[in-house]
Amino acid sequence: MGNCTANMCDRPKNTNIKFSLPGVCFVWQLSMIILFGVFVRYNEESDTHWVYTKMEKNITSDIENDFYFRYPSFQDVHVMIFVGFGFLMTFLKRYSFGAVGFNFLIAAFGIQWALLMQGQGWFHSLDPVDGKIKIGIENLINADFCVAGCLIAYGAVLGKVSPVQLLVMTLLGVTLFAVEEYIILSVLRVKDAGGSMVIHTFGAYYGLSISWVLYRPDLYKSKHMNGSVYHSDVFAMIGTLFLWMFWPSFNSAIAGHGDGQHRAAINTYLALASTVLTTVAISSLFEKTGKLDMVHIQNSTLAGGVAVGTAAEFMLMPYGSLIVGFFCGIISTMGYIFISPFLEEKLKIQDTCGIHNLHAMPGVIGGIVGAISAAAATSTVYGELGLANTFGFKGAIATRVPTVQGGYQAAGLCVALCFGIGGGILVGLVLKLPIWGDPADENCFEDEIYWEVPEDEESVPPILAYNNHMIPNKHANMTETNFAEQH
Amino acid sequence: MGNCTANMCDRPKNTNIKFSLPGVCFVWQLSMIILFGVFVRYNEESDTHWVYTKMEKNITSDIENDFYFRYPSFQDVHVMIFVGFGFLMTFLKRYSFGAVGFNFLIAAFGIQWALLMQGQGWFHSLDPVDGKIKIGIENLINADFCVAGCLIAYGAVLGKVSPVQLLVMTLLGVTLFAVEEYIILSVLRVKDAGGSMVIHTFGAYYGLSISWVLYRPDLYKSKHMNGSVYHSDVFAMIGTLFLWMFWPSFNSAIAGHGDGQHRAAINTYLALASTVLTTVAISSLFEKTGKLDMVHIQNSTLAGGVAVGTAAEFMLMPYGSLIVGFFCGIISTMGYIFISPFLEEKLKIQDTCGIHNLHAMPGVIGGIVGAISAAAATSTVYGELGLANTFGFKGAIATRVPTVQGGYQAAGLCVALCFGIGGGILVGLVLKLPIWGDPADENCFEDEIYWEVPEDEESVPPILAYNNHMIPNKHANMTETNFAEQH
Amino acid sequence: MGNCTANMCDRPKNTNIKFSLPGVCFVWQLSMIILFGVFVRYNEESDTHWVYTKMEKNITSDIENDFYFRYPSFQDVHVMIFVGFGFLMTFLKRYSFGAVGFNFLIAAFGIQWALLMQGQGWFHSLDPVDGKIKIGIENLINADFCVAGCLIAYGAVLGKVSPVQLLVMTLLGVTLFAVEEYIILSVLRVKDAGGSMVIHTFGAYYGLSISWVLYRPDLYKSKHMNGSVYHSDVFAMIGTLFLWMFWPSFNSAIAGHGDGQHRAAINTYLALASTVLTTVAISSLFEKTGKLDMVHIQNSTLAGGVAVGTAAEFMLMPYGSLIVGFFCGIISTMGYIFISPFLEEKLKIQDTCGIHNLHAMPGVIGGIVGAISAAAATSTVYGELGLANTFGFKGAIATRVPTVQGGYQAAGLCVALCFGIGGGILVGLVLKLPIWGDPADENCFEDEIYWEVPEDEESVPPILAYNNHMIPNKHANMTETNFAEQH
């Protein structure tokens, strides 16, 4: 590689990001340092004054520090963000560097902005006394959650955008997320422990809308790169499995101490198990001789975790979780088979990873399941105190009842959809400007554009190395043109 | 690929699972939903009534919820089940989809059935008041443990069975496991924290017996596929390492709170470290010029974790753990070199992953070590209270003494062996029926049969695609010299 | 492969380790068993007498056992040692077995020796009553930490030494580490929670000095093997990400209970996020058209975690952590671009993984940041009690003040440097003896020397296997028939 092929030399687009990418990174990181210097401090549990806090609050043991309630879940969520999302997207034959590398970049970029914008940042609980944002372990989890929305959106545009576009998309995405989350969680007082609405619905529609605005009619020119090879599919399974295994931690990470976290983990575990079975069933049913398709196994098996997110903390009951997983496996896999081609052909939405099937539909289902199960909650099932604890019926909303809460939950879903679609269209228009160094239609899904790719036996089109009587086969198609030019 | 080669076109067996696989998945999952609806509820620590439980039991903090004692270990066990077992089996050159994908399927399938059958399911502690099974974090761990037995068994038949056979094998395996575990743990009151007997001995003999019944005399026809390639060996190391690292969590996950979990983790850590050294020593000693064999490093390094399972919670002493690991590394590696060929040629047991060396022999050793160390326990070493806590000498067996406990431990090992061998033969006979869509002898160890496999440069033997005039390019440099020498 | 090529047949060096490797492993492991038998016992939290300890100390709950404070962090550190370091070094095209396998061997070997030598081993706190070393979870973490120093050193000599040399290097490295750590932590009473000085500075200079003594002027003969291929770079990202994600656990694992661990995690999280941005910026800025280089992404993104190690527990402030990360990303990446070539050409230090950029420079920076932030500590920021807790101003050093502590911190850095450089030179001289079976200059970075490597389509330069006269070999069997059919 490294040789100038015909395609690359006369390519119509300038993908040089030698100044824009470092520029954005430096300016951004310097801004973060200044803003953190002005606004961010440790909270009372991560400050050396904790020793005084313990005295004041009569806390007898350090194990009561929130760190010990949440750190194991935090680390699981962290793995989902960086390894889970990163490796899930390595399935393309020649975009693994971009998948795992740009995922890494935008997550590290986004979590800093997220700490300022959300969780207990500017929008939530600026300390009333000193005007500072006080951070602890829960903020780190919330920052990871916030970035998850942008990484979901990345799935829709994977391989078709430049890293500079991704940074802009993340910057604006985190900002939109923070406002949306503030409205849903703090204004409407909606419960969404696992973020079916706040994270998945928002993130997915944000990404799909951007992809719709950035529609590439000539994307077929990169069609030969838009697929997997054997080992790239195995790499993607690393992402799938870490997402699948740690999803109970995702949905329980910021749930209530004690039974809240406990129940959220159980519900998610069950929903995910159920999803695997129906995903396999549908995948097998629609392929010749019942063969399974790796795309479904890599993605649809996760749909149950998305859909059980909102209600994970509720008394959904073990069988309720199984039912949610059951339907999501079916719907998500059918989505890959029937809906994705429709979206691409009719609605002009090119969705590289199929986030519509993995995040959008299951996210909306999750919001609906949450609204229904909230509306149906009774003090018989929850106990009076349990009901108040679970739904947060105290303070300003001490008199709210479950049926009303159900209505607010549904309203929250609408807010997430509006922010996702509206925000995505606006951001898409910004990203359409011809200044971001995105790849030409014939160079999509190709690491060569933004990465130094090692010379590699496997990557050298073998035709250049050895040849003579061309034996036509499917594989040779992609190199034949170059071959013809050389002879 | 995807072309019809001679072998595949005239294959004598029908591997179409288009209806059987979806059928089993749907029927099964619907049954689970119904059974969970009738029988399964949250336990007192995962129910919203936890707030009342705390009051009644005078519990001052949510951190006393069992969730915080066991959740980190649970997640480690979860990783072992899905990534550990799954990737360990990806070593075959062309069966990585089947290894990691079917492992995923049968684990997700098995854990649901296991929640009903074991742990505190039907066999253990159906709530006497309302007849429900009450689940919490410990049940999730037990369900994962139960499935581990079936995944071990999968190792023996890897590449030679259809996914439908695997589901049947898991369904019956979990059932047998639950009965066996009930007898060993609840009737005989045997201690087996890490499951050397209950999980490993049972699982391994179950799998070996099935493989014996399903013996394929013409398996040599797939011999060229029954090996690794460079990158598949690296993928397998992901499985090995996650199993190795998290084995201390496996053996301590359901051990007693406090010192029990603490000691189990230490003992396992030490036994595993010791095993690595002797595995390397034996591997090097029996290969020409002392080269190491990846098969040994991938598998035998784990034998110490298996063998220390039963006694992990006991006062085995740090040096005792090292001794267990020392011998298991030797025995397991020697097993791969000498015993596996013997089993295949003389006893007609075809054991793809060598589970006899990794689980069967170390499991039996673990049972024996457990029996001896239980029989040798004294109140001088344990303290009176420590002895009672560790071996559960209370209630009906308050007067049992260590020597008697040693006898019961040995009896437990026999039960595990009987269930493994007897159950395996019966299940093997069921799986021998010609209705399950298993592959022909010449198509074993081949993902192509049950998966849509991507077209792939690497898989096309280059000779078929191109050959003759050499075009020099950078890539060719490294081989040109050699080439010149040969011509 | 497996064929004898010209290079290998007349190679001047004997790489046969058939007796030396098993010999060292056996002797070593037997010694460990004896020494553990004489010296090592469970500590009061992992012994069955814990039930009495609780009574004596009036501890009301098992959750107060140190196990629950540290086990999740321990497992994260464990993953960093075995998967993190192991996979980070798999980037070479044909040394992945050696990277992950020898890393596994020397870590399992080193942790046993480390338990005796450091943490609360011989050098720290031999029980005054019975002369035993009492181990618990903190010792396991310290053993892992100790081994980390040797694994860092392995990075400098990767691909150029035999496994026997690695074992000797680890044995002596752990010994030096224990003495160095004892002087720094116990004599000078220096704080170094994340080991910037004790682990990274020592380990890196130890490895660089060894590499300097073992300088190979003819290493260019293996130049074609000293690089990556596409998939080996993706494997290396597994190592990078697990190191990156779990670094907050590394730096907080042995920090003080409560706010200490909490703050160390936050500081590390922030420093690492910042490093990613500046690494990407510099990598892009110095490559043509702004392309990113995988070497930088794999390594320099981690530099912030190294550099924040010493001060992680201090009130470094969130913006302080970002600043540390900011500069380390720049310095480390510049190191790969400018300093590594200089070291190799002018100073004759061949540093395969670039540990000078990832561990040496950031480690020294970490020591300096620690000294400055200790010297600048005030009771206004920390609170009186917080200051004493954080810096351990009690007992013999109850009257020490922050400025003096700063001086001691700087002295600690000098000790680490001296032990690293001095120890490395001495050990290098030992390893230069011609008895260890190291590879010839033309066989470096090649798994074939110490591993049974599978025959592999990808690895066989296809020109050797097929073209022209078919050379029959095992691999060719499966394609010969098809080939014949087509011609």
Image (cartoon, coloured by chain):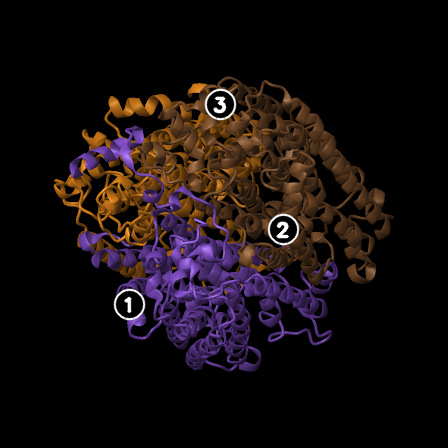
Chain colours: A brown, B purple, C orange
Residue at mark 3 to residue at mark 2: CA–CA distance: 40 Å
The local secondary structure at tag 1 comes to helix
Percent x, y of residue C207: 29, 35
Residue at mark 1 to residue at mark 2: CA–CA distance: 43 Å
- What is the quadrant of the N terminus of chain A in the image? top left
Above/below status of B160 relative to C428 = below
Residue drawn at (33%, 73%), measured in percent from left and top? B348
The local secondary structure at tag 3 comes to helix
Residue at mark 3 to residue at mark 1: CA–CA distance: 56 Å
Chain under callout 2: A
Q: In front: C281, or B21? A: B21
Q: Which residue is mark 1?
A: B341
Q: Which residue is mark 3?
A: C281
- What is the quadrant of the C terminus of chain A in the image? top left
* Mark 3 or 2, closer to the camera: 2
Q: Are marks 3 and 2 in contact (CB under 8 Å)?
A: no
Q: In front: B132, or C324? A: B132
Q: Which residue is mark 2?
A: A333
Examine the image and state in which quarter residue A364 appears. top right
